[in-house]
Amino acid sequence: MDINTIVLAASILGVMGLLFGTGLALASKKFAVEIDPRVAAVREAVPGANCGACGYPGCDGFSQAVVKGIAPVNGCPVGGADCAQKIAQIMGTEAGSSVKQVARVKCEGHEENCGNRYDYDGVTSCVAANMLNGGPKMCTYGCMGLGSCVEVCQFDAIFINEKGIAEVDPEKCTACNKCVEICPKNVISLVPYDQLTIVACNNYDKGGHVKKNCNVACIACGICERNCPHDAIHVINNLAQIDYDKCTNCMICVEKCPTKAIQGDLTLRTVETA
């Protein structure tokens, strides 16, 4: 191959490259998708946990939904009120009220209160244990303490306490909902951060065996319901349930509950009434 052929081939390739490059440049301008700069600003304002608790696929999805007007500016539970305020400023709207929530475990059925039906020696996972006849606990609604919730928490906010029951650190909890979703017993729920009263039972059965299975089980007696001055607690499907919009943390239900299935910080009432 002589030098002229090589030069000709190189020239042709150079011209073709120039033509293709010019074509791509023109196409990129013609078909470019305009990106609202507010999307990037909202993305910068959120904490970047990518937990999906907002209901969207990660922080990018949430940021796009906010700018489109689909998601509320206070829709990031991890960021909380400060994050909502920043996003509201970006969007030129009001942040609105956003009540901080935390996860709480509705069970006090540790080994002192609730025994086992059989010895479980399988995978250390609540999800796995639940597949074996509902797990080893006498109460088939209670926390098994095998840590599936701990594994999915990105914020180190939930742990298995010394009694073998899952417990939440409210200061670390971001209400991302991961522990709520993974729990096969539905024994974890989100409650307002300032709420001190909780029904620490998840048993919907009724009858004498309920108390035999767990010493602190709700027996659906209705004493809490009859004594609440704010109509904030009712027995529904054999289990006491609190309406947090009405509850004032007066602790009367805590004092009256015969099985101590309702938990609360009684010192608060002492301070307020002193």
Image (cartoon, helix red, strand yellow):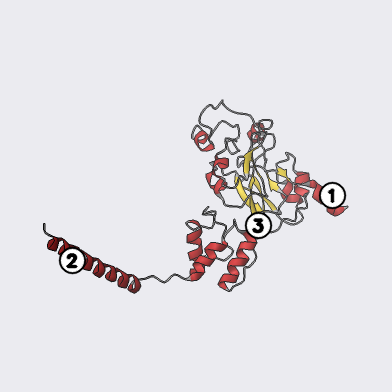
Farthest residue to the left: give it.
1
Numbered tag placed on residue 100 in the rendering: 3
Q: CA distance from mark 1 to mark 2?
A: 91 Å
Residue identified by numbered label 1? 270
Q: CA distance from mark 2 to mark 3?
A: 66 Å
Residue at the image point whose x is 31% and y is 73% from the top: 26
Which structural element holds mark 2? helix
Q: Position of residue 22 (x, y in %)?
A: 28, 71
Numbered tag placed on residue 52 in the rendering: none
Q: Position of residue 235 (x, y in %)?
A: 66, 48
Which numbered disc flags the more N-terminal residue, 1 or 2?
2
Q: Amino acid at mark 3?
A: Lys
Q: Amino acid at mark 1?
A: Thr
Numbered tag placed on residue 12 in the rendering: 2
Q: Position of residue 41 (x, y in %)?
A: 53, 67
Residue at the image point whose x is 24% and y is 66% from the top: 17
Q: In this orientation, which residue lies closer to the viewer: 166 or 59? A: 59
Q: Nearer the viewer, mark 3 or mark 1?
A: 3
Farthest residue to the front: give it.
3
> Residue 83 sits in which quadrant?
bottom right
